[in-house]
Image (cartoon, rainbow, N blue to C red):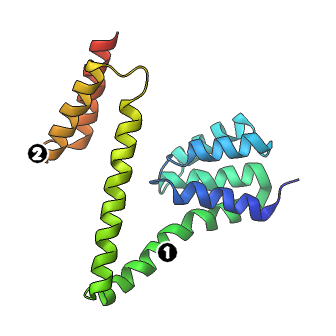
Amino acid sequence: MINPIVYFLLFLKASLFSTGGFSNLPSLRQDLLARGWAKETDFGRSIAIGQVSPGPNGLWVVCLGYFTYGYLGAALALLAITFPPLLVLLIASRVSRIERYPWAQGAMRGVSVAVISLLISVVWTIGSQPGMDWRGLLIGVSAFGLALSQKVNIVLILALAGGVGYLLYR
């Protein structure tokens, strides 16, 4: 039996910690399959419908909600994926009013330090993996250098890194 509150919270969590499109797929897949609330075919059908439907790629989640919990699931999924952007819009509308206050500037500096710390933590975690060697480090440092230059498109950097990685590791 699906608990609607937990169901909504799972979709909300996946939406909060994603960047749009299909980036919430791993979280939803793990959570829904672990609870037995979805089947692998539900994901395949949802993604296929999302690809052929007009509009943003993220709407595949509404199809997944429908396939796993009917109309209520579709409604809960829709609410869960629209709440984070709505929250960002509400906060953004207030930022212009409070950004001039010293406490807000200090808070933003604190958030910046936290984000940089998280990025360093991610880099450290990836760099300390058992499969990491000088070739992977070289690819990462080169990609980082290209990104810092801001003269090369990020998509091109990713394609170059993937191509070099393929050539070095095959």
Amino acid bearing label 1: Leu
- The C terminus is located in which quarter? top left
In the image, is residue 28 above or below residue 161?
below
Residue neighbourhood size for the residue with mark 2, other residues' Cα within 10 Å, grouped as few (<14), some (14–19), many (≥20): few
Is 33 situated left or right of 129 in this image?
A: right
Front residue of 5/75: it is 5
Element at label 2: loop
Amino acid bearing label 2: Lys
Element at label 1: helix
Residue 167: give x, y in percent of width and height.
Answer: 27, 13
Residue 41: image quadrant is top right
Distance between the alpha carbons at the discs numbered 2 and 1:
33 Å
Residue 101: give x, y in percent of width and height.
Answer: 28, 88
Residue 36: image quadrant is top right
- Residue beneath label 2, please? 151
- Residue beneath label 1, please? 87
Q: Which mark is residue 148?
A: none
Residue in view at x 26 percent, y 19 percent? 135
Is 16 situated left or right of 127 in this image?
A: right
Residue in view at x 32 percent, y 84 percent? 103
Q: How many marks?
A: 2
In the image, is residue 152 above or below residue 18?
above
Residue 161: give x, y in percent of width and height.
Answer: 26, 28
Is 84 situated left or right of 76 in this image?
A: left
Residue in view at x 58 percent, y 54 percent? 14
